[in-house]
Image (cartoon, rainbow, N blue to C red):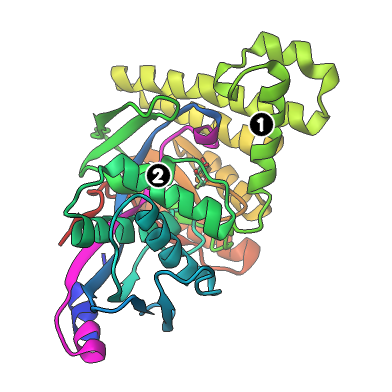
Amino acid sequence: MIDTNILYDEFQRRFGRQGVAYSAPGRINLIGEHTDYNGGFVFPGAVEQSITLVISSNGTNKVNAYATDLQLEALFSINGPDGPSDVNMRYVYGVVREMIAAGIAVEGFDVVYGGDVPLGAGMSSSAALECCFAYALNDLFGGGRLDRMTLAKIGQATEHKYVGVMCGIMDQFASMHGRKGSLMRLDCRSGEFEYFPWNPEGYRLVLINSCVKHELVGSPYNDRRRSCERVAQLAGVETLRDCTWQQLEQLRQQLSDEDYRRARYVLGEKDRVLAVCDALQRGDYETVGQQMYLTHEGLAKDYEVSCEEIDFLVDEARRIGVTGCRIMGGGFGGCTINLLKDSLYDAFCEEVQRSYKKRFDVDCKIIPVVIGDGARRL
Ligand code: GAF
């Protein structure tokens, strides 16, 4: 998390008064990738890397925002029909509009924000941004009236309507509901969820950022979702959650090879999430790891959301003896998530950095995973 004092000072310098601080985190996901918009299960946890903002109402109907990391300023009306064109500010504008639509009497405000969720790393910096604003505006103008799931849905609606990414609910859910030390299993169809204390004795999680910037805006992410919807429709089910292997095989002749493979990945991932839940009950991390490698294979070959750099990182992880590794998040770059024995940690980090640099002449980044809390007032 970034030093909040920097934001307090910047706020004071720009607006000549004090503001209140809020924070919301990025996330990891152990398993259950691209299952959220298919009505399936996901297994995320919030991380310590967060977006933090300092805010105060300004008695007008204008938002005066400054993003410290991007050194980006924007001034826009909360009632303006179009809002700012800069994509980063569209998240802010979208949340404002959606909060108003949800019945919160948002007024103009001054805000300074920044954070340490790496951009384009698949750790959901955009969900952290949406959730931070949704939580803050709900507190400031709504007396905390909207519950966390409603706020998560406001973040998701912002992606859909103002940014054009037809994402599922996992990232915003995790950013809103995270709890220190726990992963969460969310049923994306019913919205029910459970906390799973994450104490993998003798093992740990680490992310390796390939530094290939993934960008879901305008990416084939939406195409993946459309493939799934087409198959679900032909199968006569609401989402692929309800499509069986048998139904998929019966439909095979009617489907393009591409749609068939997308659906095959999703059905496989449903089974893997359940296998991981079982294995976790037994403390069987070797099985968890095997399932992670299988997920990567599906994401790379059937879902086609990996890339050369990430495949290299997964192959390296396997070679070095990492228990489980796969691409994490929406795909098309970003991070791998690695489950490994504590005793292998130092050697793995050193070796993977060395070989990645040699292969691509790029420094990959090691990001230790610390499971943190969800959105909150500081
Ligand atoms: C992105 C999306 F925002 C999520 O909703 C989810 O679909 C994920 O990709 C893939 O599991 O992070």
Residue at coordinates 64% horizontally, 28% vertically from top-left?
265
* Quarter of the rendering containing residue 139: bottom left
The amino acid type, in three-letter code, at marker 2 is Lys
Q: Is residue 188 left or right of residue 58?
A: right
- In the depicted structure, whether residue 375 falls above or below residue 234: below
Front one among 181 and 150: 150
Residue at coordinates 55% horizontally, 26% vertically from top-left?
269
- Which circle's residue, 1 or 2, is located before the other in the chain? 2
For the residues bearing labels 1 and 2, Cβ distance under 8 angstroms: no
- In the depicted structure, whether residue 245 falls above or below residue 137: above
* Quarter of the rendering containing residue 140: bottom left
* Residue 273 is one of the magenta-drawn residues: no
Q: Which residue in the protein does label 2 denote?
A: 153
Residue 315: x %, y % from top left: 59, 43
Is residue 3 visible to us here? Answer: no
* Residue 27 is one of the magenta-drawn residues: yes
- Which tag is nearer the camera, tag 1 or tag 2? 2
- Tell me the quarter of the image containing the N terminus: bottom left
Front one among 22 and 121: 22
Q: Which residue in the protein does label 1 denote?
A: 228
Front one among 309 and 318: 309
Q: Which range is magenta?
A: 11-37
